Image (cartoon, helix red, strand yellow):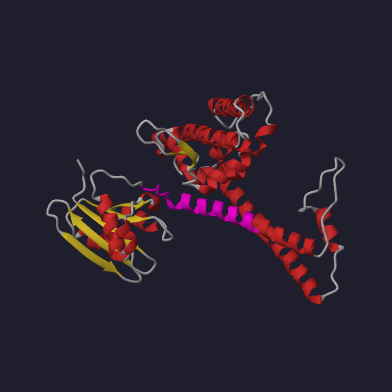
């Protein structure tokens, strides 16, 4: 039986909130609008005048989860609904306004058969670390774009980087040799010279920005709370320390997932389902969920063809032996699965890689659970003294 008496659906915007409330016992419906400068205390004061217990909800979006976190601190249960799980009808699409949106949310949360999904609400520290990890990802994208713009500009003017290593491979365009080559380039036209200077300076400042973010991220990863997770997750091949910190920040609490399939679904690596009656058909992966985790794991799995067949056991004195053993089992299993799908089943390399990424995330979840249980045990022991 549902424990809530009153349900409140809210359509939250930057400068206003439209709320619709329903009392399940009496059927009474109320409306309230909060103007610019609204705060959680103002909303909690209004909700407290309704018959309790009450449940508030609003859809995910650019306004974040601070309101739900503040309402929870004030004793008001609040959920943030994943917007992709809210069903919409043709009528909802034709008549869209704040009142209709609030009513649609209210209709879903008051329905005994709930079909929506509520997103995870991290604490302030976890959210701050997640924002820093995402800032690093965006800075890396900006750096790639800046370097590509510079290379494209030079190519249009007949300058192509072609310095090679002893093995015959082209050297990377981010080292000292590339910078020395750029120093030798000049243009007759002043405008072209100014463009070249601007693009080169932009690439340099973007690289410095990325280095500063990575330095700050490394400091966060070395904290007492994050270091065990980073050390453990980075034992898995294809997961760097930066990726491990991203995984820790994005997941938050590993125990919030009940099984491995939910973890794979969370990063959008499960296939679409188009089944009806006796017909069972699976499509491509959904690509819904956390795109940051999915991208970092896919990029890390690019080294799969170069993985060695046998994985030598490693020693990590700071980690439990069971965690190190589990990471070794994961590396061996992932390597064998990739070879089996690619060589024996004849799957395309990308399909085999995505299958391995889906399973890799499940191994990461298991190892994260082990570290989480270890940390909670240590906290309980410390509380006894």
Quarter that holds the N terminus: top left
Q: Nearer the viewer, residue 120 or 146?
A: 146
Quadrant in the rendering for residue 143: bottom right
List x then y, in percent, for residue 75: 28, 53
Most distant residue in the bottom direction: 190
Majority secondary structure in the magenta region: helix
List x then y, in percent, for residue 370: 48, 31
Using the image, determine if residue 144 lies above or below residue 265. Answer: below
Q: Is residue 274 left or right of residue 222?
A: left
Q: Is residue 259 left or right of residue 355?
A: left
List x then y, in percent, for residue 68: 35, 55
Quadrant in the rendering for residue 237: top right
Q: Nearer the viewer, residue 279 or 170?
A: 279
Report if residue 132 lies within the magenta region. Answer: yes
Using the image, determine if residue 295 lies above or below residue 236. Answer: below
Across the whole image, how many numbered discs are drawn on residues?
A: 0
Report if residue 248 lies within the magenta region. Answer: no
Which residues lie in the magenta part?
118-142
Q: From where the camera sits, is residue 170 visible?
A: yes
Q: Is residue 128 left or right of residue 140?
A: left
Q: From where the camera sits, is residue 232 visible?
A: no
List x then y, in percent, for residue 12: 35, 62
Quarter that holds the C terminus: top left
């Amino acid at each position: 039986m549902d424990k809530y008496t009153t349900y409140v659906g809210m359509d939250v915007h930057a400068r206003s909130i439209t709320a619709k409330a329903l009392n399940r016992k009496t059927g009474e419906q109320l409306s309230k609008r909060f103007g610019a400068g609204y705060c959680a205390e103002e909303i909690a004061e209004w909700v407290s005048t309704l018959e309790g217990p009450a449940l508030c909800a609003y859809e995910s979006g650019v306004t974040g989860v601070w309101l739900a976190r503040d309402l929870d601190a004030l004793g008001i249960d609040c959920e943030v609904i994943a917007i992709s799980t809210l069903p919409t009808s043709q009528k909802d699409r034709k008549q869209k306004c704040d009142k209709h949106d609030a009513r649609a949310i209210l209709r879903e949360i008051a329905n005994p058969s709930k079909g929506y999904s509520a997103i995870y609400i991290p604490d302030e520290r976890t959210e701050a670390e997640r924002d820093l990890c995402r800032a690093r990802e965006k800075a890396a994208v900006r750096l790639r774009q800046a370097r590509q713009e510079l290379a494209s500009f030079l190519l249009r003017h007949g300058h192509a980087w072609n310095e090679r290593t002893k093995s015959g491979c082209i050297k990377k365009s981010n080292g000292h040799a590339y910078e020395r080559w750029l120093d030798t380039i000049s243009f007759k036209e002043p405008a072209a010279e100014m463009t070249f200077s601007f693009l080169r300076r932009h690439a340099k400042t973007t690289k410095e920005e990325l280095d500063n973010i990575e330095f700050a991220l490394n400091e966060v990863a070395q904290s007492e709370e994050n270091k065990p997770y980073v050390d453990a997750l980075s034992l898995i091949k294809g997961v760097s320390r930066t990726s491990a910190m991203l995984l820790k920040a994005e997941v938050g609490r590993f125990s919030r997932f009940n099984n491995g399939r939910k973890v794979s679904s969370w990063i959008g690596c499960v296939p679409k389902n188009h089944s009806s009656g006796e017909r069972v058909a699976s499509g491509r992966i959904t690509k819904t969920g956390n795109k940051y985790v999915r991208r970092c794991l896919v990029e890390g799995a690019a080294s799969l063809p170069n993985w060695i067949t046998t994985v030598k056991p490693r020693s990590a004195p700071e980690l439990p032996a069971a965690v190190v053993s589990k990471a070794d089992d994961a590396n061996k299993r992932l390597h064998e699965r990739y070879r089996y799908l690619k060589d024996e089943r004849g799957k395309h390399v990308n399909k085999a890689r995505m299958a391995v990424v889906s399973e890799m995330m499940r191994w990461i979840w298991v190892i994260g659970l082990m570290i989480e249980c270890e940390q909670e045990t240590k906290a309980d022991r410390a509380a006894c003294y």
